[in-house]
Amino acid sequence: MGQLNERLAQFIAAREIERMVDDEQRLACSLLWLRNPVLFPSAGNVLSITQQDLSNLIGISRQRVNRALARLESRGVLRAEYRTLRVLDAQKLVDLTVEH
């Protein structure tokens, strides 16, 4: 039941995210979903995902994902590696989702 509630909350949040204009904010929300301990118990600070997969998940182009990743990396939020994202500061991800 807990997992069903998490999925429902994720679905509702996905509809909300579609209205966000800022790519960084959309990316931050999606990365937080992928780190959800209820839905993905083995997820930690290292996510094995490509920019194309993120693009499909978020609904923006791979080029826009690339730019948003670069901005987040320059802020010290994460480090983008080959087919991997390493979250350096999870609190900054959370902060990005509530600003704007």
Image (tube, rainbow, N blue to C red):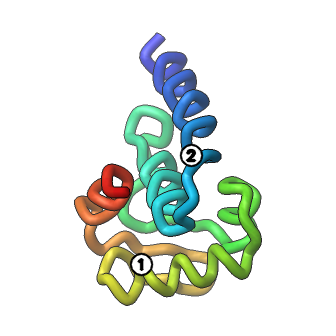
Which residue is more in the foreground, 65 or 20? 20
Q: Is residue 35 left or right of residue 14?
A: left
Assign a secondary structure to mark 2: helix
At 47% from the left and 52% from the top, the residue drawn is 29
- Which residue matches tag 2? 17
Eyeballing the image, is 9 above or below 74?
above
Which amino acid type is marked by label 1?
Answer: Leu
Residue 57 badge: none
Q: Is residue 66 left or right of residue 45?
A: right
Which amino acid type is marked by label 2?
Answer: Ile
Eyeballing the image, is 90 above or below 69?
above
At 49% from the left and 35% from the top, the residue drawn is 39
- Image coordinates of residue 98 in percent, x first then y, are 32, 50
At 36% from the left and 64% from the top, the residue drawn is 45
Cα separation between marks 2 and 1: 18 Å
Eyeballing the image, is 95 above or below 37?
below
Residue, far top: 1
Of the two numbered discs 2 and 1 on the same chain, state the one appearing first in sequence: 2
Q: Is residue 61 left or right of residue 46?
A: right
Eyeballing the image, is 16 above or below 99?
above
- Image coordinates of residue 68 in percent, x first then y, are 54, 77
- Image coordinates of residue 8 in percent, x first then y, are 55, 22
Assign a secondary structure to mark 1: helix
Q: Nearer the viewer, mark 2 or mark 1?
A: 2
Residue 28, quarter of the rendered image:
bottom left
- Which residue matches tag 1? 72
